[in-house]
Amino acid sequence: MNSISNIITELEFAQIGWVVPDIRAVAKFLSGTLGIAGFPEPEYIRAQDLDMSYHGQVVAADWLTTQTYNGGTFIELVQPLSGQSMFHDYLAKYPAGGTQHMAFRLPISNFQQITDNIREQGYVLISEVNHPIAHMAFFDTYQTLGVATEIMGITPDGWKAIAQMQS
């Protein structure tokens, strides 16, 4: 098995991300109707605070987000507020909201190789975040998968954070 194949075997499905027009209504539905509990109060996020790029530049954008862990998968909800981001783009195209991305994780040591491999296949990087717990790259895989693909390179502190969120 070549080195990229070895890295691919380390990828784990980690998260489904929904972009929605009303985060509280969606959390209420998922909790009350489908029994997916544990969504904390939505948190206000600014792209600039995360140094989150959008097509290669950090631009002004903000949104609300919340997530919970259910049945082995994190469920993330995002409600765009203002500015430009992949979340705003999605809601502009699909005003009712929907599944915007699927996230896969692996150790940070293999992040660069897997993201380089995806770029080499011709997929465009939409957004990127370098956070202390994870480096995240979002690729435009809409034509292939119908959703964006997020690759999360988890740092040692990130694995600790994940373990806390799972318990």
Image (cartoon, rainbow, N blue to C red):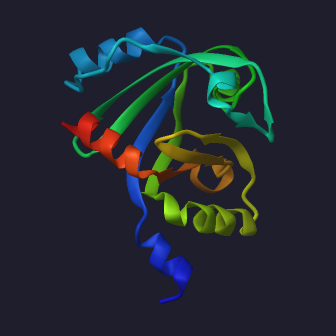
| Residue at (50% x, 50% y) in the render | 152
Q: Is residue 26 above or below residue 139?
A: above
Please give left or right for residue 93 compared with residue 151 in the image.
right
Q: To which quarter of the image does residue 74 belong?
A: top left
Whether residue 70 is visible to the viewer of this picture, yes or no, is: no
Q: Position of 114 compared to 89: left or right?
A: left
**The C terminus lies in quadrant:** top left
Residue 10 left/right relative to 51: left
Whether residue 105 is visible: yes
Tell me where residue 43 appears, x and y as whole percent: 46, 15
As displayed, is residue 140 above or below residue 23? below
Q: Residue at x 67, y 33 (%)?
A: 52
Locate residue 139, reporting x and y percent. 66, 50
Q: Return the x and y of residue 36 as percentages of the image width and height.
A: 24, 26
Q: Nearer the viewer, residue 72 or 156?
A: 156
| Front in this rendered view, residue 125 or 144 | 125
Say which residue appears at 43% left-offset and 63% top-offset: 11
Task: Check the image and report above or below for 59 versus 105.
Answer: above
Q: Residue at x 80, y 41 (%)?
A: 56
Q: Position of residue 65 (x, y in %)?
A: 48, 21
Q: Is residue 156 above or below residue 64?
A: below
- Number of numbered labels in the structure image: 0
